[in-house]
Image (spheres, rainbow, N blue to C red):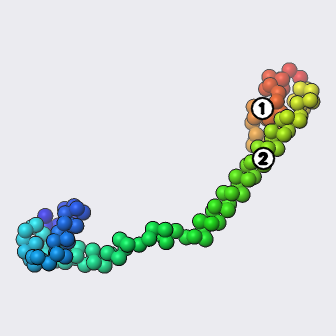
Amino acid sequence: MSKDNKVSKQEKAKIVMTVLRGEQTINEIASQYSVHPNLISRWKQRAVNNMAELFDDEREKLDRGAYREQAHKIEQLEKLVGQREYELDWLKKNYPSSATAEKSKLVDRENSSITLGRQTELLGVSRSSLYSH
């Protein structure tokens, strides 16, 4: 195990914990694990430098303003979708009194945003009624 990339994370943690306990010198530990003492010193330094991050509050990493803004946008979109669903239901309920031929005239065959099938579904007419007139 003479190279840094051949030692697993778990093994590095075990070696660094041994160093931090202070029961053996770095040279003794290096000999025991067949790792160069300089590597052990680097791992120890990295561990000590990053130890404070173990105690970071993950909630602090969130950008509160961006989170509130996104939540507000989602709320607005849900409200808009709900309004559209209500309007569509109202239209379907109040429009069926019209004759099928009259409804079929409302279909826009040039509209590429709403398919013919969806238009006929929204108007409450069968798609085949478009071709019988």
Relative to 27, is 90 on the left or the right?
right
* Percent position of residue 49, x then y: 31, 79
- Is disc 2 placed on a helix, strand or loop? helix
* Percent position of residue 109, x then y: 82, 35
Q: Nearer the viewer, mark 2 or mark 1?
A: 2
Q: Residue at x 11, y 76 (%)?
A: 23
Label 1: which residue?
Answer: 121
> Is residue 6 placed above or below 111 in the rendered structure?
below
Looking at the rendering, which quadrant does residue 130 occupy? top right
Quadrant of the frame with the N terminus: bottom left
Decide if residue 116 is in sight here: no
Relative to 108, is 58 on the left or the right?
left
Mark 1: amino acid: Glu
Q: Residue at x 22, y 76 (%)?
A: 44
- Is disc 1 placed on a helix, strand or loop? helix
Looking at the rendering, which quadrant does residue 75 occupy? bottom right
Relative to 55, is 90 on the left or the right?
right
Marks 2 & 1, CB-CB < 8 Å contact = no
Label 2: which residue?
Answer: 84
Mark 2: amino acid: Arg
Q: Residue at x 27, y 74 (%)?
A: 47
Q: Is 22 in front, or is 127? A: 22
Residue 102, numbered circle: none
Relative to 22, is 128 on the left or the right?
right
* Percent position of residue 71, x then y: 63, 61
Q: CA distance from mark 2 to mark 1?
A: 16 Å
